[in-house]
Structures are given as C-alpha cells and as structure tokens.
Amino acid sequence: MDVVGAATALFEEASAADERRLLVIAGDRERTYDGLESILDSLPVPITETTLVGPTDRLRCEHVPQSNADRLLGTTRTAVALDATRELRPNALGSLVGTVDGGGLLILLAPPLETWAERRDEFDETLAVPPYSIDDVTGHFRARLVETIRAHRGVAIADLDRDRLESDGLTDPAPRLAAGPITPPANHGFPDAAYDACYTQDQADALSAFESLVDPDPYPGPDSDSEPDRDRAVVLEADRGRGKSSAAGLAAGCFAAAGEDVLVTAPAARNAAEVFARAEELLESLGVATAEIDRSRSNAGTIDVTGCDGRVRFATPAEAAANATTADVVLVDEAAALPVSRLESLLAADRIAFATTIHGYEGAGRGFSVRFRDRLAEGRHEVIDATLSEPIRYAAGDPVEVWAFRALLLDARPPVEPLVADASPETATYRRLSSAALLADEHLLREAFGLLVLAHYRTEPSDLARVLDAPNLEARALVHDGHVVSVALLAREGNLSADHRADMYEGGRIRGNMIPDILTSQLRDEDAGRHEGLRVMRIATHHAVRSRGLGSKLLECVHEEFADRVDWLGTGFGATPDLLAFWRTNGYSAIHCSTTRNDASGEYSAIMLAPTSAAGTTLHDRHAGWFTRRFPAVCSDALVDLEPDVARGVLRSVDARSELELSDHEWRVVASAAYGPGLFDVDPGPFRPLVVRYFCDDDSSDIDLSTREERLFVLRVLQGREWSTVADRLGYHSTSQCMRALGDALCPLVDEYGSDVALETRDRFVE
C-alpha cells in the first residue's frame, strides 16, 4: 500500500476543491507515526502550517497536548495530526476539526479500527468515577465514531497493520463557480477599507448590520416631532468557519476608529483572539496608529487608538456585565456558550451585538436561539438579525464538516414543533435511554442529545461520550408519538469507601461526585459520601411544550423508579427564583448555597435534596439544619450581593425548622423595634434568626407581608446593607421611611413567633 500516494491524492483533491479531507491512519502506534512522517515529508505543506496534537513531541512541527487543543480555536492550519492511539478526547477532536483550513488535511492516528471500541484509554479513566472502575466503561462512543468514519465521504482509511487502503476518500467534486465581487451596501457608514477586508458577500452584509449600532442622536431637537431612537442589538448567527468573529472584529475596529469605547467579551479571552486580530489589522490599514497593545489578559488585551478616545478592550463576562453601561458598544463573541442569565445581564448596554455559533464546539446555539432570543424580543432593544452561511475557511458542502456534525452531534436538535405540539403528561410515555438503545437508534440519540444541549449553556463533544459510555450516568425521557419531549441526565453519586471519603475530607477531589464532594470538603461532613444518591445533572423539556407539567412528570417517574434503590435524589444548579420554585414544587429542598459565583453564569449555585430513605433523611436533616444556622452569617459576608429574590427563594426551599433561641433581653430588643422606640441598629443579631425562621416556616403564608417587605428583610436584616442603599433600591422616599417600614414588617413576626416576654413588651406599647 502506498500511503504517501494516497495522502498526496487526497491533499491535491482537497486543494483543488478548497475543501478539507480526513485521513485515518490505523494500526500499531509506531507504524502510524512512520506513515505520518513520510506523508508530512512529501506534502507541500510548510512546517509552520502543521500541528501535531498528542502526548509526545515526535515531529519537527508545532506540538500541542490534547488537553490544550482548545488553544487552537480561532486559528487555522493546513495539516493537523491528532494522535489518538493511546487516548482520544472528544473535545480535542471537536476543536481541531475547525482549525483545518480549506485545502488541508485532518490526519487521525488510531488503533486498529476493528478493536478500537474495545480498548480503554486515559479519557475512559475520567469516566470511571468512584466507586466504578475502568472495566465498567463502555466503548459505544468510539464504536459510533468508527461507524461514521467508514460511512462518510471525504474520509480515507489506511490500515497499516493489514497494509491496505480501506478507502481512498476521493469524492471527484464538480467544478465550482467563481465567487462574484464583494459589494458594500449603498450609503454605507463604515470605511471602504472595512468592506474591502471582508472575505465573502455574506460577511459584508453582516458588517452592514453592525452599522445599525452607530450612535444615533438620541435627543431630537425641540422642534422635532420624531421620537428618540430605541436601543439596538445585533444578533449574528453562523456555523463554524463562516467568519462571524472576523466580522465582529472589523466592526469593532470601525467603532474604535470613530472614537468609541468597544467592550468585547467572550467565555474566555482566547475566544476573542480573532476579534482583536481583525480590529488591529483594520486600524492599521486605515492608517490609524495604535498605541502598544496591552496583552495582560492572555491572548486578548486592549487596543488604544492614538489621537482619539477609541479603543477595543476585553472583559470577562462577569466584568462586562458589571461595566456594560460604561462602554459605547458591547460585542459578545461566542454568545451561545454563555448562560441566559449572563446574557440578560449584558442587556444593560444600550448598543450591543451578539455573535454566536449555531452548531459547534464553542457552545449550544439552540439554547441561545430558543431561550435567550425570546427574552431579547420582549426587551427594550430593537433587534437586527444577520446570518452567515457561506464558509470562508473552506468551500460549502465540505465533507469533513458534514462528518464532524454527525460524529460529534454538533447539530443535534430536538424534534420539530409540529411533531410534539400535542404532548402532555397524559400522552407521554416514560422511557429508559440506555447507551445501547441510543447507539442503536440515531434518531432517538439526536433528539435526546438535542434536548440536553438546551438544558445547559455549554454542551461539549465529551458530553456525548459520557452519555454513551460513563457507568455512573443514566438517561430517562418522556416520549410522545415516538419523539423525545423531555429528558433527564442522572448521575449516581456516593456509595464511597471510607478511604475515598477520608481523601475528600482531607482535600482530595473525587470525580463525578459533586454533592458528596461539596458536603464533605466544604461543609466538613466526612459521612456525606457513605450512602448512594442520584443527582439530576440536567433536565430539559421541549420549548414548544413547556409549562405543561412534563418536567415535573419526568421527575415523578424518576422518583418512582429509583426511590427504593438510592438514599437520596439531588440536584445542583445556578440559583434563580423560578428554578428554586420548580425544584421545591417537585419535593426537593435546599441544603446549601455556594459562596462564590460561577465565573460564566454569574450565579450562586444551590444544592437541593429529596431524601428517599432513613439514611437520606438523616443526611438531609443534618445539612438543612446547619444551613439555616449558618445562612445569616454567610448572607452578611460572602453572600452580601446575593439577589434578594434568590435569597428568599433559597430559604423558602429549606425543609427545616429554624430554631429561635433568643434570650429575654433579645426578644425585648426585637419587640421594641417592632412596636416601640427600639432600634434595629443597636443589636441586629437577634433579628436575623427571626427572619430566617419566617422564610423557612411552611406556615408563614399566614403572615401577610409584601414582596417589598421581604426584600427589605434580606437587604437590611440579613445582608446588612446601608439604610440609604436599601431605601434607594426599594423605592422608599427616605431612610426614615425605610426604617419605619422595617419596624412595621417585624410586627407580625413578633406576633407569630414571639415568646411571652416579647408579647408582654408588645402589649406594653400597643396599650
């Protein structure tokens, strides 16, 4: 077999068609490397355009470990070789597919394809979470991967052990018509140089959409009959390789050249590298000298335009949300990789653009388009849409892109709306989605995984491998007329040995056991991992049939199936009032609230449990009691910026009676502040457990307090915010009015929970 000749023919066809090709070199590891070296020596590809991704630096070209493959996102290479002979990380494969330029080769070094699924590698070890071993991990993901490799066009397979070419990968593509000239729109406002820098007409049209963010005169003259222009938002959607980041970078350069402050944010600084590169190139072509670029933020920084106030600067999503109103324009790259709550917080900006990948490694575009777009449409911004469909890195119809979409389910989506429009809890059937069943039914797999994509702001190729191979995971669904309408991904946790529990208690990390890990390492409960639980990792219902009770029905079915097999059911999520209410309605109660925000979502996480055995009840009750006792102190410290409605929701979700152990003197202080001349500020301490007791009390609905009064409890009593800050936030006319409102709100609490001493004090002032 002439593997060099086969690779040369494949490369020549890829170059002529401006497409990519995939070459799989299977067999003994040393043979695959010998073949790879021969191929790279013969191909007319510069060493600077070649990258080897794998465990060892065996070639003269750039070397990157699989664990760092995501560093190549946003870059392009002519030849990329991925060494998967000892390990295959699905995320590495997902990120590398997009780095290969048109006319280039993606070369995959693999074990013999017939036995690949039976082998276990280092990635499999990450799936073998305690108490499971690597022998419990299946090979379904790789079995499916091999199936797609053999089935798709544009994929060559060289079996070196058998010395035969299983497939040459040649497709004999038809000649392509030359693209026409790029034409900017008439009366465009951005410089001609920006449109000259566009690669496709698609990109020029997208750049034109960004012109809608040019600052209008928001205040018409006194004699004008026109209304001020609305705030505006541009949404640019595209598959990978279409140049959305490039278009955003050109727009950023145009705004900066006009003297505007452009704030760029993305899930990570590296994701914004293309935006900064294109902005810098444009500013240089415009002859606008830029000051030395600050690269202090790793692959992104600040471009300052000399001679004006214009600049392009990077901020993390959390920083961008806090400073959205200080910038002239906010550009969000890879928006689909951010959670909806974080995207909503960025809408404080008057002029904002979202560039997002519809299908791809960087994020879950359907979550963005289904969940966030509805909220954007209901807001104050006028929305301008733009879509990029023409690839710029390679020709349309590229076979490697088609293969990657299927192999990694990058374009997985739930069923179309008409197929599930009539779904209800009564018509839906509960179904176990075993990995074998998913592997055997591509339609079922795509629908289930498509819904899981919607459940989380970032779903990666490795998640597909976990669903198919991880021994601790279970998938369950509700199916209507054969279509998945609600799906849950469940993780078995706990049942850990004494050694594992001790390791966690002493600071070690045990993979795949989130709830036992938190309860043990953070809350110092070494016994928390003893008993077995089932955590609901993700749950999603089709957007067309939400609010019909399908999610609750699915949780009910899960409870019925597993209640006799585990000690507790649990969940952990970014806490919002709606989610807290949903889980509480379904029998889960809060036992913990994280003391740090998630970097991407900006939310504090809540842990909730639904005990199913005596041991689970003991675990729950222990932590629920600890939570109510520590919450007042934490709320005035690490959680001082917790949203009042989230604090209310968390406490309302606690299934524990908060004990009131106030002394007679403390009750006199509280009752006097409520009914008499006493002051809260003299001794805030005793007020805090009283307020916690009110929120945690299932019978507190008998107490008639307004939402504003409850927020007042959180802001002033629990968090200790300044009176002036609380009064301003809650709309009180003065701090004195706010202080009186607190006293009035405390009255029914004294009536309901007060001791004899408290009631005697109350009666003294009432009389």
Image: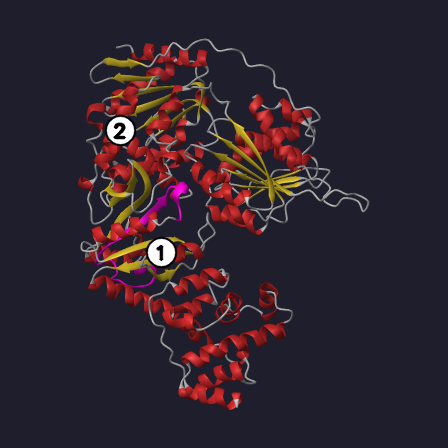
Residue corresponding to mark 2: 144
Q: Is residue 136 magenta?
A: no
Taking depth in this image into account, of 141 and 257 the one nearest to the observer is: 141
Q: Position of residue 703 (x, y in %)?
A: 44, 73
Seen at 39% across and 34% down, the residue is 418
Q: Marks 2 and 1: in contact by CB < 8 Å?
A: no
Q: Position of residue 629 (x, y in %)?
A: 37, 71
Taking depth in this image into account, of 618 and 47 the one nearest to the observer is: 618
Circle 2 crowding by C-alpha within 10 Å: few under 14, some 14–19, many from 20:
some
**Distance between the Cα atoms at labels 1 and 2?**
35 Å
- Highlighted magenta segment, given as a residue range: 519-547
270 lies left or right of 26: right
What color scheme is it? secondary structure
Per the rendering, the mark at residue 583 is: 1
Residue 486 visible at all: yes
Q: Quick one: SS at disc 2?
A: helix
